[in-house]
Image: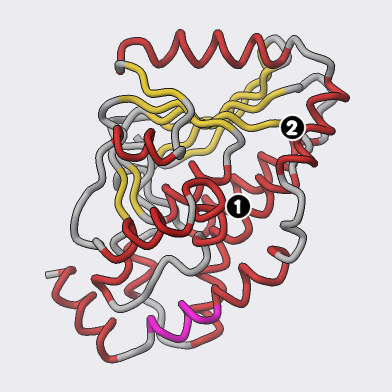
Amino acid sequence: MEAFVTSEVKDNLGIITFFHPAGNSFPGVQLQKLVDTLNELDQNSAVSVIVLQSEGNSFCAGASFDELVAIDNLVDGKQFFSGFANVINAMRKCSKLIIAKVQGKAVGGGVGIISAADYAIGTEKADIKLSELTIGIGPFVIEPAVSRKIGATAMAELTLDASNWKSAQWAFEKGLYAQLVPLEALNETTETFATQLASYNPEALAQMKKVLWQNTDNWSTLLYERAEISGTLVLSDFTKNALAKFKK
């Protein structure tokens, strides 16, 4: 299948589904499509709650590797890493509560998306990894979202153990997932929870969203400052050599 980001409205639920054949990784164009879709559902008065999900076995492999290896200047580098900054800020600013439905593994920016959701339901297959240090950069853009969700100590453990996966159980215990269910129960569990949440007073939900995200207004500048750090590091000899080895 070709890559896509789609949305549908069903019984006060706005359901966003994304897919990319490379492990549900995100090229820049598709990241922007996700931002636009989030903004559209935010403005839709028929939507009370948003469910974010992906097709396939993996939830999200992060940013596009092909675009990453093609970066050769700071402007392009900052723009590339700003892609997930745009998504996280769109999720943060969205007036609707967002539920992440996580069926499989997540890497890098995928972990950032889960962290930026207001509630995440994972399966026992939904392991996570932040592998950025292995190629000479770091998860700078997504760090505020991940640290906010699992705490600074767990964020450090996840980031510094960059070569290894953390189990879904570990992520659940650290607070990334609010629920951990068998894969076969994911659809029903998510639908039941989302439908119940959407039945509540929309004004109360919108106010709760503001409360949950208080003290994050500085992310409108912070995440792009972090994108510039990554954009600078990706031009380093260390990263270029690491990417060349990985590509081979």
Residue at the image point whose x is 69% and y is 31% from the top? 97
In the rendered view, tell whether residue 136 sits above or below residue 166: below
Task: Write down the residue under mark 2.
Answer: 96
Residue 96: name its quadrant: top right
Task: Compute the Cα span from label 2 to label 1.
Answer: 14 Å
Return the residue found at the far front: 153
In the rendered view, tell whether residue 121 sits above or below residue 148: above
Of helix, strand and loop, which one carries label 1? helix
Three-letter code for the amino acid on which mark 2 is drawn: Lys
Query: Which badge, 2 or 1, comes first in the chain's sequence?
Result: 1
Residue at the image point whose x is 55% and y is 8% from the top? 192
Query: Magenta stretch?
Result: 228-234
Any part of residue 204 in sight? yes
Q: Which mark is residue 87?
A: 1
In the rendered view, tell whether residue 234 sits above or below residue 205: below
Give how far across and how far down residue 90 sits, in percent. 68, 49
Residue at the image point whose x is 42% and y is 65% from the top? 139
Give how far across and how far down residue 45 sits, in percent. 85, 24
Of helix, strand and loop, which one carries label 2? loop
Give how far across and how far down residue 71 sits, in percent. 41, 79
Out of 16 and 153, give the one closest to the viewer: 153
**Left or right: 209 as drawn, with respect to 179:** right
**Left or right: 233 as drawn, with respect to 163:** right
In the rendered view, tell whether residue 55 sits above or below residue 22: above
Three-letter code for the amino acid on which mark 1 is drawn: Val
Return the residue found at the far bottom: 237
Give how far across and how far down residue 215 sits, in percent. 75, 56
* Residue 231, magenta (yes or no): yes
